[in-house]
Image: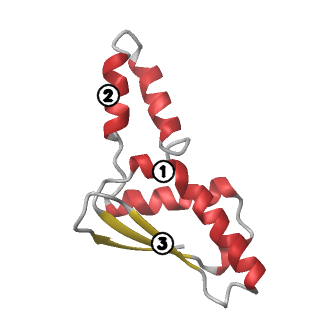
Amino acid sequence: MVLIYAKGRQGEVKIGFSVSKKIGNAVVRNKTKRRMREAVTPLIPCIKPGCRLIFIARQPIVDEKLPDIRSSMKYSLKRTGYLNPNPPQLQDKEKQRAGDTEAETKESDNEKCGGNPI
């Protein structure tokens, strides 16, 4: 999977997906786009605002499972610096849970940002 990114003008995150005809017929391409959309959905709160992202599918994605696709997306976002480890929504929740242990807080933040760390 390839990630193309650009800084946006507004504070919102825009995400697009591209699957070429080389991947397969229309059914395979649409299935791949649906799986990519589902894989990135839990990561959206963790993406820094004001960026535009385009994920381009490559042939191996057809056989990959959803957690592997999500892991690949998370890795790409981490490399570009657009993955925010402490999104604003989660920071507010941390303040509310002042009595919780630090380990529990990190674990719940990790779940909100798409599962296990890479």
Q: CA distance from mark 3 to mark 1?
A: 14 Å
Element type at mark 1: helix
Quarter occupied by residue 80: bottom left
Q: Position of residue 12 (x, y in %)?
A: 32, 58
Looking at the image, which residue is at 70% across and 65% down? 64
Identify residue type, mark 3.
Answer: Gly
Q: Position of residue 92 (x, y in %)?
A: 32, 28
Looking at the image, which residue is at 41% across and 13% down? 100
Marks 2 and 1, the one that precedes in the sequence = 1
Q: CA distance from mark 2 to mark 1?
A: 18 Å
Identify residue type, mark 2.
Answer: Asp
Residue at numbered disc 2: 92
Q: Residue 35 vs residue 4: left or right?
A: right
Looking at the image, which residue is at 53% across and 57% down? 40
Element type at mark 3: strand
Residue at numbered disc 1: 43
Residue at numbered disc 3: 16
Compared with 75, 106 (above or below) is above
Q: Residue 3 vs residue 86: left or right?
A: right
| Image quadrant occupied by the N terminus | bottom right
Compared with 57, 116 (above or below) is above
- Dots 3, 1 in contact, CB < 8 A: no
Identify residue type, mark 1.
Answer: Leu
Badge 2 local density, few (<14 within 10 Å), some, or many (20+)?
few
